[in-house]
C-alpha cells in the first residue's frame, strides 16, 4: 500500500479527492490531511476538512491546520467557484471536533519521520504549495522520506485564474518555486490534463438525485460549478484535484512527458505561470517533473463514479 498525506483547501474538487482516497483503502494508507488557505480562508477549509472526514467515515484520520496565508502574497479566495462555505450548495452536518493540531507543518514532519522502517510518504497537495514549501524549508530532513509529490497545480498551456496561471500556483508562486526545485520527484496534474477530467451534466444530476447521502452531497457540490459563470455554457465540470488520487490508484488512465518546470514569481502578467521547458527534455526523468497531458476520459469517469459508489 502507498502511504499518502493530503494537503488541501476544500474546496469542491478537494472534497472529491478526499472521497476518492477514502474509497481506495485497499490501495492507499491515508496518514493525515493538512489544510492551507486557498479556495477559502483557513477557518473555512479546515472546518470543511473536519466535516468531510466525519461524513466519509474517516474519523480516525488526523486533520491539521497549516498555513493561514501564502508565504508573501495576499490571499484571494475563490468563492466564485467554490461558494461562501467552500463546498458549493452542499451543507454537511456541523461537528464540534477541532483540528488535531494547530501546527500542521510540525505534525506532518513527525508523521513522515516516524513512518515504520524505511517506508516513504507520497505527498498529495491539491492547493497552494505553502505548507509543502514550509515543510521542506523548516525540516529538510523529510525530503529523504518523500517518495514523490503528486500535485494538482500549474499548466504548460494557459491558465484559469489568469490567461497564463493556474489558481494554486498563482496564489503562492514563491512556495511553488521552492517545491519544484526541492529535488523530490514530482507528478504535475496541471490543467493540461485536469481540464479534460470531469463529469457531464447528466452524471452530476444523477448524483444529485441519488438517495445515497454521499452521492447526493457530491451532486450538490458539483452542481454549484455548473451554476457558476465559468461553467454556465460548458458541458463538463473539471474535477481537477481528484486527478491526483486517481493517478495513484489508476495510473494507466494517464499519459505524460518529463520536463523541467520553473515558476514565474514576478508580479507581472505572468505571475504564477509554470514555465515547462519542452525543448527536447521529454524522456529524461532526471531532476524533472512528470507533466500529465492526456487522459482516457470515459475510463476516468467510470472509476470516479465507481469509487463514489463505495459509500
Ligand atoms: C485548483 O484551484 C482550486 O480552485 C481547485 O480546488 C483546484 O485545486 C484548480 O485550478
Ligand atoms: Ca484545491
Image: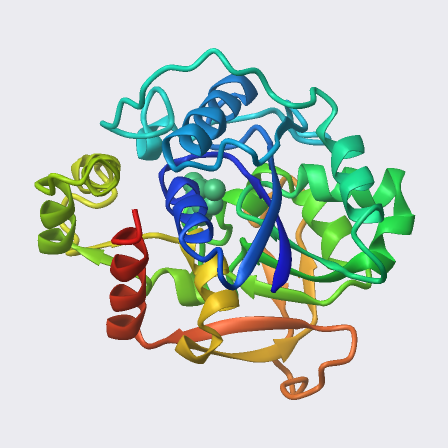
Residue 253 visible in the shown view: yes
Q: Nearer the viewer, residue 91 or 271?
A: 91
Question: How many numbered tags mark residues here?
Answer: 0
Q: Quadrant of the N terminus?
A: bottom right
Is 62 above or below relative to 160?
Answer: above
* Quarter of the view holding residue 288: bottom right
Query: Seen in the image, is 182 located left or right of residue 216?
Result: right
Is 173 above or below relative to 143?
Answer: above
Query: Seen in the image, is 33 located left or right of residue 14?
Result: right
Q: Residue at x 40, y 40 (%)?
A: 15
* Quarter of the view holding residue 32: top right
Query: Seen in the image, is 74 located left or right of residue 252?
Result: right
Q: Position of residue 251 (x, y in %)?
A: 48, 75
Q: Nearer the viewer, residue 189 or 120?
A: 120
Query: Seen in the image, is 97 located left or right of residue 52?
Result: right
Q: Position of residue 286 (x, y in %)?
A: 78, 79
Q: How is the image coloured?
A: rainbow
* Quarter of the view holding residue 61: top right
Q: Residue at x 83, y 46 (%)?
A: 114
Q: Position of residue 58 (x, y in %)?
A: 48, 37
Q: Residue furthest top?
A: 96
Indicate which quadrant contains ligand 1. Answer: top left
Q: Nearer the viewer, residue 177 or 270?
A: 177
Residue 161 visible in the shown view: no
Q: Position of residue 136 (x, y in %)?
A: 82, 46
Q: Residue furthest right?
A: 141
Is 227 above or below relative to 136?
Answer: above
Amino acid at each position: 500500500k502507498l502511504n499518502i498525506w493530503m494537503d488541501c483547501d476544500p474546496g469542491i474538487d478537494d472534497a472529491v479527492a478526499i472521497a476518492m482516497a477514502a474509497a481506495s483503502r485497499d490501495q492507499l494508507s491515508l496518514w493525515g490531511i493538512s489544510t492551507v488557505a486557498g479556495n477559502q480562508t483557513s477557518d473555512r477549509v479546515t472546518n470543511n476538512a473536519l466535516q468531510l472526514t466525519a461524513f466519509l467515515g474517516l474519523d480516525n484520520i488526523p486533520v491539521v491546520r497549516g498555513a493561514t496565508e501564502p508565504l508573501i502574497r495576499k490571499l484571494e479566495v475563490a468563492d466564485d467557484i467554490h461558494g461562501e462555505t467552500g463546498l458549493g450548495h452542499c451543507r454537511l452536518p456541523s461537528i464540534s471536533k477541532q483540528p488535531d493540531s494547530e501546527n500542521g507543518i510540525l505534525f506532518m514532519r513527525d508523521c513522515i519521520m516516524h513512518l515504520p522502517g524505511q517506508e516513504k510518504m507520497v505527498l498529495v497537495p491539491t492547493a497552494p504549495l505553502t505548507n509543502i514549501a514550509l515543510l521542506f524549508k523548516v525540516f529538510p530532513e523529510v525530503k529523504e522520506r518523500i517518495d514523490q509529490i503528486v500535485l494538482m497545480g500549474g499548466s504548460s498551456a494557459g491558465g484559469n485564474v489568469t490567461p497564463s496561471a493556474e489558481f494554486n500556483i498563482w496564489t503562492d508562486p514563491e512556495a511553488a518555486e521552492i517545491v519544484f526545485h526541492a529535488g523530490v520527484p514530482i507528478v504535475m496534474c496541471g490543467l493540461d490534463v485536469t481540464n479534460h477530467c470531469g463529469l457531464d451534466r447528466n452524471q452530476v444530476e444523477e448524483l444529485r438525485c441519488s438517495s445515497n447521502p454521499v452521492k447526493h452531497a457530491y451532486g450538490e457540490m458539483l452542481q454549484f460549478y455548473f451554476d457558476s459563470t465559468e461553467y454556465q455554457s460548458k458541458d463538463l465540470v473539471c474535477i481537477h484535484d481528484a486527478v491526483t488520487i486517481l493517478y495513484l490508484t489508476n495510473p494507466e488512465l494517464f499519459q505524460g512527458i518529463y520536463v523541467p518546470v520553473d515558476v514565474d514569481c514576478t508580479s507581472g502578467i505572468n505571475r504564477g505561470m509554470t514555465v515547462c521547458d519542452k525543448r527536447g527534455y521529454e524522456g529524461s526523468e532526471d531532476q524533472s517533473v512528470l507533466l500529465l497531458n492526456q487522459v482516457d476520459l470515459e475510463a476516468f469517469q467510470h472509476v470516479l463514479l465507481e469509487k463514489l459508489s463505495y459509500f
